[in-house]
Amino acid sequence: MIAEIVAVGTEILLGDIVNTNACFLSRRLAAVGVDVYHHVVVGDNPGRMAAAFRQALGRSDLVVVSGGLGPTEDDLSKEVMAEVLGLPLDFDAAVMAGIEDFFRKRRRPLTPNARKQALVPRGATVLPNPVGTAPGLFLEAGGKMVFLLPGPPGELGAVWEQHAEPLLRRLGVGGQVILSRTLKVCAMGESQVAHLVGDLFASSNPTVAPYAKPGEVHLRVTAKASGPEQARELMAPLEAEIRRRLGWRVFAVDDGTMAHAVGERLVAAGLTLAVAESCTGGMLGALITTVPGSSRYFLGGIVAYANQVKVSHLDVPGELIRERGAVSEEVAGAMAAGVRNRLGADVSLAISGVAGPGGGSPAKPVGTVCFALARPEGLFTWSEFLRGDREEVRGRACQVALTTLYRYLVTGNPEGE
Amino acid sequence: MIAEIVAVGTEILLGDIVNTNACFLSRRLAAVGVDVYHHVVVGDNPGRMAAAFRQALGRSDLVVVSGGLGPTEDDLSKEVMAEVLGLPLDFDAAVMAGIEDFFRKRRRPLTPNARKQALVPRGATVLPNPVGTAPGLFLEAGGKMVFLLPGPPGELGAVWEQHAEPLLRRLGVGGQVILSRTLKVCAMGESQVAHLVGDLFASSNPTVAPYAKPGEVHLRVTAKASGPEQARELMAPLEAEIRRRLGWRVFAVDDGTMAHAVGERLVAAGLTLAVAESCTGGMLGALITTVPGSSRYFLGGIVAYANQVKVSHLDVPGELIRERGAVSEEVAGAMAAGVRNRLGADVSLAISGVAGPGGGSPAKPVGTVCFALARPEGLFTWSEFLRGDREEVRGRACQVALTTLYRYLVTGNPEGE
């Protein structure tokens, strides 16, 4: 079964809104084992809508249309689809009663154009909308299945979950389940990952595909099987092989982050953490505390944005700042040592850099970031040149700091293998 | 000039990522006066890619392809487009040198598959990628224009802004210009905004439309005209009228944020700021320092995630924490006073709350957040119940703290009008 998602709405083509409906529907269709081969977006134009609907009906078994079911004259999905399928529109009294009820409950006057939403293509199954006035519709015609769903994401989601997906399951659609797991790889670029596991990319079920992310590579393992358990069984050996080759560099799965990976290792080792931040302004602490329960290991931090705070609250010698500059490995080292000592933490991280857009110099251009990791064995300092705008440099700096801490916690060495 | 955006990537069809590239490109094309009639998404399948490219070239004047330019065997956009247009692929030594440089700067070994990214369809203009290895490409063939752009949004955005859009402008593409400005409104709900300026929503050119955001309302003013200057002239009186009615509550325009608004007011008043954070873990400081030049007024902060740090580094009496709890207006007040005193700032903000998912109690459920603003006139403390998951509560807490500071700086009173 091949599906296609057609979103209708000029606002998407103008870039005013992102087509999150296509993303939601794709994920849900994959979960019931339906392959999506195309997403299409057309504006509120009857001619182009009709062409898109005809093409979708020609090449796909299931067509899911989102948007264009509202009360205004611009909302034409139902009218155009009915015409393409040669179906008349009938007034549905039950739908109208639901719309009237919706307005009454919200104490809003019923508007004349609301009646348009009670027109239903002959033979369609009405899928009630629990959070809005436009119901979803399901049609079967010429061996094809069609859903028409309201455009607001909250309404589309509710109609899909409560009515459309159960109906598909009742019809025995899909059957085969597609499951995916994303293995996240650190401390290695996409080409290097491809070099080490690229031969596995030829596998067909399960498949594995790489996605380059800033500072990380994601390997997505996908399996298709008769059920979730069978899909998981298919994926397990491939995942094990990837982990065997890449080792600790696989730091997280799916929604897991480097902050989670670091947290797990700190808890396992019984260590506490503190941070000292300059250019990141608190972002590293904010990232660490995205993890629920991070209070088990994170004590806190000193945001020393002004140099005077580096001196007064991190015991960085003022002379060191004058001689080496605030953005130097020496000052980062003193910051890490200072916060570790002051907060009584086992390990600490410090970041001081030039995030830009101003503040760069020939010797220390924008993107220069100095780091330090203070640990019982002593100080480890290093620096990197990070690309991107101010927020990218700051975000990458936090990621680099956490990745180095993770590497130290796993291998016993910030540069360990 | 009619444009079409074709995104290539099975991950989009699986619902793993949202097609934000299409949204970005649509907005940018609208700004140069190009109408987008279709978005299409196809997977990494050469047959379906070729069909999508052919259809796009048939019905559109400008085809923008995103994704499929990476180094792996799955990345086929360049190869398929070259075949559709009947162009051979040539090895480009200059592109290869750029790729080698990219790897060298990152101290990563160059992998054999990197060479694939240096193949260029004959006659194509190379659009350098400042943040990645795959350059963008521009082709003209059979009266049509084609852009091939890298898929990672940061790379696509950089290539578009630095090379693709300037090239389109040099070619004199585009007709009527659509310009928008977003006025951001704080301290007022959507219905109150509609009550005060709703009559302006009927205007047709320029138009104005409200968008409710968490804690803010955005008013989007849009004008269509023969040029950018004419569009701006159309918008100016409408914007002036909105500002006349809503006053200081219009705190920012377009990319401006509350952090910018607060920064401008602090600079104007010659005041310095410090923060004390518990549940937000550094997020407030990170937000304040998104603003370039924030070192003019932001001294730094203390992230007192552990209670012992509240006592040792913010002078919060241990007894107060035991009696009132760490999440209390009294403790928030002591935190704000402590950081203001310790860092020698003119004003300070403190946040202590239950961000969840654990840690709630019947008296202080998840979402309870206590705040304090310390200023020369004394302490102002308050608390709010914020909805959402852990990250939403933390983000909203920072927004609430900054909005209150802004209100104080503008009106002289944290609750002023």
Image (tube, coloured by chain):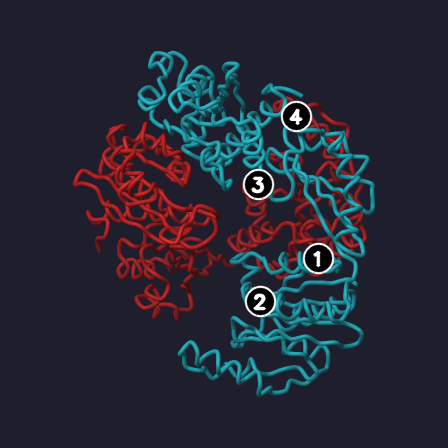
Chain colours: A cyan, B red
Amino acid of disc 1: Ala
Query: Residue tagged by mark 1?
Result: A31
Say whether mark 4 and mark 3 are on the same chain: yes
Instruction: Give the quadrant of residue A64.
Output: bottom right
Amino acid of disc 4: Phe
Q: Which numbered dot is residue A158?
A: 2
Q: Nearer the viewer, mark 4 or mark 1?
A: 1
Amino acid of disc 3: Gly
Query: Residue tagged by mark 3?
Result: B154
- Per the model, the C-alpha gap separating discs 2 and 4 is 47 Å
Q: How many C-alpha atoms fall within 10 Å of the one at disc 3: few (<14), some, or many (≥20)?
A: many
**For numbered disc 3, what is the local secondary structure?**
helix
Say whether mark 3 and mark 1 are on the same chain: no
Q: Position of residue B43 (x, y in %)?
A: 73, 51
Query: Residue tagged by mark 4?
Result: B103
Upstream in sequence: badge 2 or badge 1: 1
What chain letter is assigned to the residue under label 4? B
Instruction: Give the quadrant of residue B103.
Output: top right
For the C terminus of chain A, the quadrant is: top right
Say whether mark 4 and mark 2 are on the same chain: no
Do we see residue B206 in this rendering? no
- Per the model, the C-alpha gap separating discs 2 and 1 is 17 Å
- Per the model, the C-alpha gap separating discs 4 and 1 is 39 Å
Q: Which numbered dot is residue A323?
A: none
Q: Nearer the viewer, mark 2 or mark 3?
A: 2
